[in-house]
Image (cartoon, helix red, strand yellow):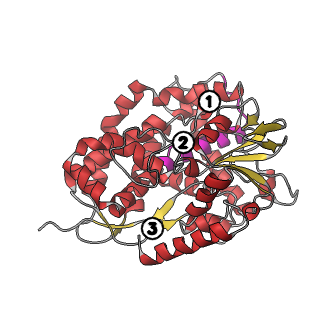
Amino acid sequence: MADGAMSALEAARAEAYTTPLDQIDVSVQDRFENNTFWPFFERLRKEDPVHYTPASEFGAYWSVTKFEDIIAIETNHQVFSSEKNISIGDNDNQNPENPQDQFELPMFIAMDPPKHDEQRKTIAPIVSSESLRNMQPLIRERAGKILDELPIGEPFDWVQRVSVELTTQMLATLFDFPFEERSKLTYWSDLITNPSAPPSIINPGTDMTWDEMRNELLACAAYFKGLWDVRVTEPPKHDLISMLAHGEATKDMPLFEFLGNILLLIVGGNDTTRNTLSGGLLALNENPDQYDKLRADPSLIESMVPEMIRYQSPVAHMRRTAKEDFEFEGKLIKKGEKVVMWYISGNRDETAIPNPNAFIIDRERPRHHAAFGFGIHRCVGMRLAEMQLRTVWEEILKRYPRIDVVGEPVRLRSCFLRAIRSLPAQIPARA
């Protein structure tokens, strides 16, 4: 870690432990952009693991910060609902003149049973064991081509050249999307990954208004509706659009619900792999002993991949809404209140994970983490994400003994997704 980053983290630690406990707000997005949020979660885990914040950018909310407590909330969908929203932000204070407040997109991850279960079941075959086996050769071929085209001995952006390109190609396959237009998928994913932020944050360097953002999402809907209209006239095929178009639980979806599910699948099929691939390279560079261990024994990729996912925690949180008054760990959570499960904190919980702040590629229980959630909302694509990451790291090690990070990462200003937008890297020239 660079000296500047370390001093910023030390300053954050001082702030975290001198701020009155009842004034701590772990949702401050600037801290996610500069990676200084860690000590605030550390303090809550120690002193107030179920913590109420009365006022924030997103209104009042409860924070659940310990691993076992997160599991308890996640698996109690009878009391804690997904239907209001899955992120900390919502439309509690709707403004009828604000187009953002009038643009709600239903999606199955933000539904409760039975509708959630029916829609999730429709797309589950895309990540069956047989489907993954069939996709792996194509993923390997594409990863090899991407890696072979990287420059040697000169800096490049790992995120754009590798992480984005690999995941966008995979998304195009999952949707049977026109391959030559796959950059649209990256654009739409980036457009919506920080919906609570001002448009200039969503699209750095632009002055996009909410009206313009809405129009872009409607263009996305129109594009996918065109693909839907073709698939619905064809026999069912093994791609996500065809599955939705022919599924009993999804074939009659309203347009905005279709768009919501498409955007969910774009982000879900993209960000976990994309940001773990970037965060994993960064973690190996920050922990050279682990990189040495990997080079000495490439079979450790099997345990390294889930450790990378835990360590990166690409989805920082998920949110539920209390359907009734409920006492939890001595705190009274009232009906209608927001409950935020901070996966990023649960994955560093000292009482559940040994030495959690260390990146250890041969952990004894590497899949003991909260990054994919639990219960009925556990990430449907988790095995696909792991398979992609395993495959690309196998191909990396075949080609390059070392890939160096040569600059600081640029992170997204978001407390929902822990995303890396740019990562300068360089492959050393061979002697």
* C-beta proximity under 8 Å, tags 3 and 2: no
User: Which residue is rendered at x = 38% and y = 58% of the image?
Assistant: 283
Q: Secondary structure at mark 1?
A: helix
Percent across and percent down for residue 341 are: 65, 46
Closest to the observer, 320 or 213:
320
User: Which residue is rendered at x = 60% and y = 72% of the image?
Assistant: 14
User: Which of marks 1 and 2 precedes in the sequence?
Assistant: 2
The residue that mark 3 highlights is: 409
Q: Disc 3 or disc 2, which is closer to the eye?
A: 2
Seen in the picture, residue 340 relative to 368 is either above or below; the reply is below
- Give the image quarter of residue 73: top right
The residue that mark 2 highlights is: 370
Q: Quadrant of the C terminus?
A: bottom left
User: At label 3, which amino acid type do we have?
Assistant: Pro
Judge left or right: residue 304 versus residue 242.
left
Percent across and percent down for residue 282 are: 38, 61
- What span is colored magenta in the figure? 249-273
User: Which of marks 1 and 3 precedes in the sequence?
Assistant: 1
User: At label 2, which amino acid type do we have?
Assistant: Ala
* C-beta proximity under 8 Å, tags 2 and 1: no
Percent across and percent down for residue 225 are: 63, 40
- Give the image quarter of residue 233: top right
Residue 376: which numbered mark, if any?
A: 1
User: Which residue is rendered at x = 70% and y = 56% of the image?
Assistant: 215
Q: Secondary structure at mark 3?
A: loop
Q: Is residue 369 magenta?
A: no
User: Which of marks 2 and 3 precedes in the sequence?
Assistant: 2
Residue 352: which numbered mark, if any?
A: none
Q: CA distance from mark 3 to mark 1?
A: 34 Å
Closest to the observer, 14 or 313:
14
